[in-house]
């Protein structure tokens, strides 16, 4: 350990005066090699101090980021896990809904096929009924015409001539179909 004496302090003051004077740097380095080492150490100390302050500032910034970043990351992870669960449940519900709709679609297709078949059968029945109706209408039309001729002939007094005509024959057949057994004998 170096002991500081008044003489040492005076020497340091002289060296600092030379260092402060213009061109003293060259004199100081030429005069005292220890001073050169001291100057280098002081420069290194200043540089290390500046680097330390920069590191401290970076550390504080990243510490803040790590603290808030890890908190934000934990929150986003928790939110994502909740969303995953919700989406899983929604996916399951959608799959069940799809299966249900597919079953309903199969049923509706079967119902449609049955309806088309029923419509075809109904159309066939309507066609048969329309043919039977047309036949019955023609028959009734002929009967009505025969009645009109019979009524006309009876009104004119031609009873004998009417009974031998085709219209009378149609009228007799119609009456026999609608009459009871007792009345049929009378008409024959």
Image (spheres, grey):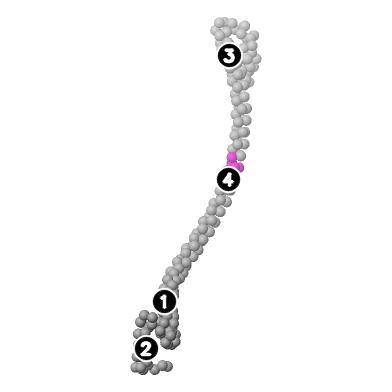
Closer to us: mark 2 or mark 4?
2
Label whose residue precedes the other's in the sequence (4 or 3) = 4
Using the rendered image of the protein, determine whether residue 67 is visible from the camera's viewpoint: no
Closest to the observer: 187 or 167? 167
Rate crowding at label 3 as few (under 14), some (14 to 19) or many (20 or more) other CA atoms within 10 Å.
some
165 up-or-down from 114: above or below: above
Closer to us: mark 4 or mark 3?
4
Q: At 35% across and 93% down in the image, what residue appears?
A: 7
Circles 3 and 2: CB atoms closer than 8 Å: no
| C-alpha separation, residue under disc 4 versus residue under disc 3 | 58 Å
Residue with the mark numbered 4: 105
Residue with the mark numbered 3: 145
The range drawn in magenta is: 108-112
Closest to the observer: 6 or 124? 6
Residue with the mark numbered 1: 50
| C-alpha separation, residue under disc 1 versus residue under disc 4 | 77 Å
Using the rendered image of the protein, determine whether residue 99 is visible from the camera's viewpoint: yes
Residue with the mark numbered 2: 12
């Amino acid at each position: 350990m170096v002991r500081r004496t008044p003489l040492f302090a005076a020497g340091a003051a002289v060296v600092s005066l030379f260092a402060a004077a213009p061109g003293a740097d060259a004199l100081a380095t030429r005069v005292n090699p220890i001073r050169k080492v001291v100057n280098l150490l002081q420069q290194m100390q200043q540089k290390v101090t500046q680097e330390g302050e920069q590191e401290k500032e970076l550390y504080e910034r990243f510490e803040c980021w790590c603290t808030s970043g890890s908190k934000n990351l934990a929150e986003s992870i928790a939110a994502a896990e909740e969303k995953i669960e919700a989406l899983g449940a929604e996916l399951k519900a959608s799959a069940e809904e799809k299966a249900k709709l597919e079953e309903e679609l199969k049923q509706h297709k079967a119902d449609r096929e049955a309806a088309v078949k029923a419509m075809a059968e109904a159309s066939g029945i309507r066609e048969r009924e329309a043919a039977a109706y047309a036949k019955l209408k023609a028959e009734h039309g002929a009967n009505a015409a025969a009645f009109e001729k019979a009524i006309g002939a009876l009104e004119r007094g031609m009873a004998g001539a009417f009974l031998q005509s085709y219209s009378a024959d149609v009228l007799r057949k119609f009456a026999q179909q609608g009459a009871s057994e007792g009345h049929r004998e009378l008409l024959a």
